[in-house]
Image (cartoon, grey):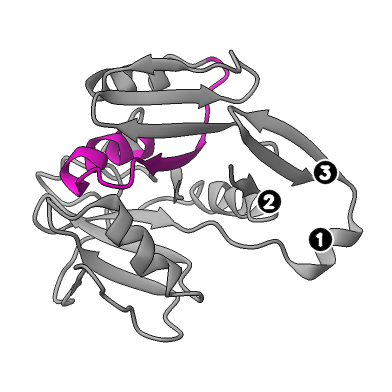
Amino acid sequence: MGRIAAYLALFGALTACSSAAPPKAPEGRKLCGWDRLGAAIPMAIEEGTRLGSGARVVTVRIPPALPYRALQETLARAESLVRLKVVVDGEALLPLSRPAPALPEDALLPEETTLVGERRVTRRRGAPRVRVAEVRVGPEGVTLHVENENPRGIELPTARLAEHLAALDPPATAFVVTAAPELPWRDLEPALRAAACHDRAPGEEPHEVLLD
């Protein structure tokens, strides 16, 4: 399983930034956040798509039937990519981050490690404490692992994920979402929306979601 490493520090920085007064949410907005497509032309992700070399943030439109495997293959070819902004609800943008490798200097810093399911979460000591949850999406629902809870996780329907996340105490504020390789995007998107927006209103900053 993957290792969540130094980029956890990014969560703390993004959380601090979200304390600033956000822009007014667009009227009629259903998804949390405020980012909209506007005049930008999103890139369509298809089998074999290659994102622009050197791009760090890319706005994309993902077909409902695209298998998660194809999206992973596209992301694997874009080494510099940090964030996707995925078009949902016609023009709303759902921000998704990519796991970043540890910086070389991090190897010299003391670390502490915990498990989220079978995934190792490694932090620099003294880094902001962000509770992490992993959402694994399959054809029949999701398996949820939350840091410092039942290591075996729980299985629940995707439709109940937002409700369950909103009830966590203490709350999880950073999420890693992954899926079965052939799961179509239409079945993955509801889990991503739940992780990002389960306790957020239109105009409020989404939770940080890593697409792994």
- Residue 162 in the image: state x and y as whole percent: 32, 24
Q: Are marks 2 and 1 in contact (CB under 8 Å)?
A: yes
Instruction: Determine which residue is flagged by label 3.
Output: 126
Which residue in the structure is indicated by mark 2? 5
Q: Is residue 66 magenta?
A: no
Q: Is 186 within the magenta? A: yes
Discs 2, 3 touching: Cβ within 8 Å: no
Residue extent of the magenta highlight: 169-196
Image quadrant assignment for residue 92: bottom left
Type of the residue with mark 3? Gly
Q: Nearer the viewer, residue 206 or 84?
A: 84
Return the mark for residue 106: 1
Compared to residue 194, the image places residue 76 above or below, namely: below
* Tag nearer the camera, 1 or 3: 1
Give the CA separation, mark 1 to mark 3: 13 Å
> Is residue 127 at least partly visible in the picture?
no
| Residue occupying the point 63% across, 47% down | 4
> In what element is the residue under mark 1?
helix
Q: Position of residue 137 (x, y in %)?
A: 34, 34
- Mark 3: secondary structure: loop
What amino acid is labelled 2 in the image?
A: Ala
Mark 2–mark 1 Cα distance, whole angstroms, equals: 9 Å
How many residues crowd around disc 3 within 10 Å: few (fewer than 14), some, or many (20 or more)? few
Q: Farthest residue in the bottom direction? A: 53
